[in-house]
């Protein structure tokens, strides 16, 4: 009897792959048989990811700025060559700020939109152009509960993540004919380097007060939902969805037993 041929590894691109949710997602995908190109603007972050994933089979690393259209086109093409059949894209690259609306300069607002929204759009578009000729795939964008509900200090960040929500739904409509699914995950507070840099102790107390599960998420908990959305054996009929992974924050009213 002839041996059954081994199925080829599915390939994915993860932007912002050097740390936080991106790194946790890449690690989980590698553990479950994917080939992954980790893309990050920070050489230091990529070096850290190389060390963490030194023994992982199928890990590739690329430095690229998601706000540079030419760099994005080159990075997506190179990543696709590295991973083989490109079946998944995770847009984790992003920046944040916690500033009152009256203290938010236009330059900062534009920078956040450029990285979070335009970067997500350009990476998704470049990848979709390849996927449409190779049987489709899945794109997962990282939104935020800050794009679903108004939170203090999030005028620029929240606006960018709200834009990602609509971007995701439009991309899902436009790309469905090519067998490309597009969804978004909207995390609440997550223990990432970005959050550590901007959340004060007072911020943490506020979040704990209004999150029924009374804690921040670990990056791996967000990665599990991303993997579900990437895997056609689990989510083949899911597209245009925004899944909040927030410990109950979005749906909470009065929270029992909190001061």
Image (spheres, rainbow, N blue to C red):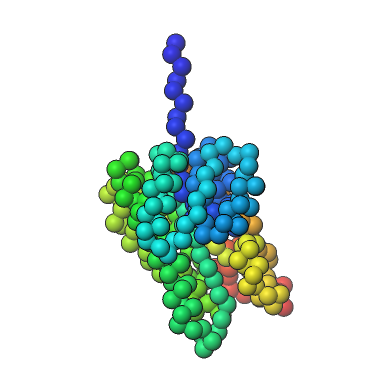
Of all residues, the one furthest to the bottom in this rendering is 102
**Quarter of the figure with the C terminus:** bottom right
Front residue (pair 149, 93)? 93
Name which residue lies at 29% across and 56% down.
174
Left or right of 24 on screen, residue 88: left
**Residue at 40% across / 63% down in the picture?**
68
Toward the viewer: 73 or 220?
73
What is the quadrant of residue 171 in the picture? bottom left
As displayed, is residue 58 above or below residue 39?
Answer: above
Q: Position of residue 151 (x, y in %)?
A: 54, 77
Q: Residue at x 47, y 72 (%)?
A: 112
Residue 6, image x and y in percent? 46, 26
**126 w.r.t. 215: above or below:** above
Q: Is residue 190 above or below residue 1?
A: below
Q: Is residue 213 left or right of residue 110?
A: right
Q: Position of residue 222 (x, y in %)?
A: 57, 55
């Amino acid at each position: 009897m002839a041996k059954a041929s081994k199925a080829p590894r599915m390939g994915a691109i993860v932007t912002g792959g050097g740390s936080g949710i991106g790194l946790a997602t890449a690690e989980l995908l590698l553990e479950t048989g994917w080939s992954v190109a980790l893309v990050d603007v920070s050489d230091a972050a990529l070096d850290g990811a190389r060390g963490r994933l030194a023994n992982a089979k199928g890990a590739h690393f690329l430095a690229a700025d998601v706000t540079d259209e030419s760099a994005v086109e080159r990075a997506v093409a190179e990543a696709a060559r590295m991973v083989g059949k490109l079946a998944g894209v995770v847009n984790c690259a992003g920046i944040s700020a916690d500033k009152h609306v009256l203290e938010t300069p236009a330059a900062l607002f534009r920078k956040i939109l450029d990285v979070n929204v335009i970067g997500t759009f350009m990476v998704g578009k470049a990848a979709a152009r390849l996927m449409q000729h190779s049987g489709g795939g899945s794109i997962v964008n990282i939104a935020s509960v800050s794009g679903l509900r108004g939170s203090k200090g999030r005028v620029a960040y929240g606006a960018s993540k709200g834009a990602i929500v609509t971007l995701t739904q439009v991309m899902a409509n436009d790309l469905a004919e090519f067998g490309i699914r597009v969804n978004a995950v909207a995390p609440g507070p997550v223990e990432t380097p970005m959050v550590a840099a901007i959340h004060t102790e007072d911020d943490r107390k506020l979040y704990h007060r209004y999150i029924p599960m009374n804690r921040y998420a670990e990056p791996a908990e967000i990665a599990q939902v991303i993997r579900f959305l990437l895997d056609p054996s689990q989510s083949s009929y899911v597209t245009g969805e925004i899944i909040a992974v927030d410990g109950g924050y979005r749906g909470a009213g009065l929270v029992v037993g909190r001061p």
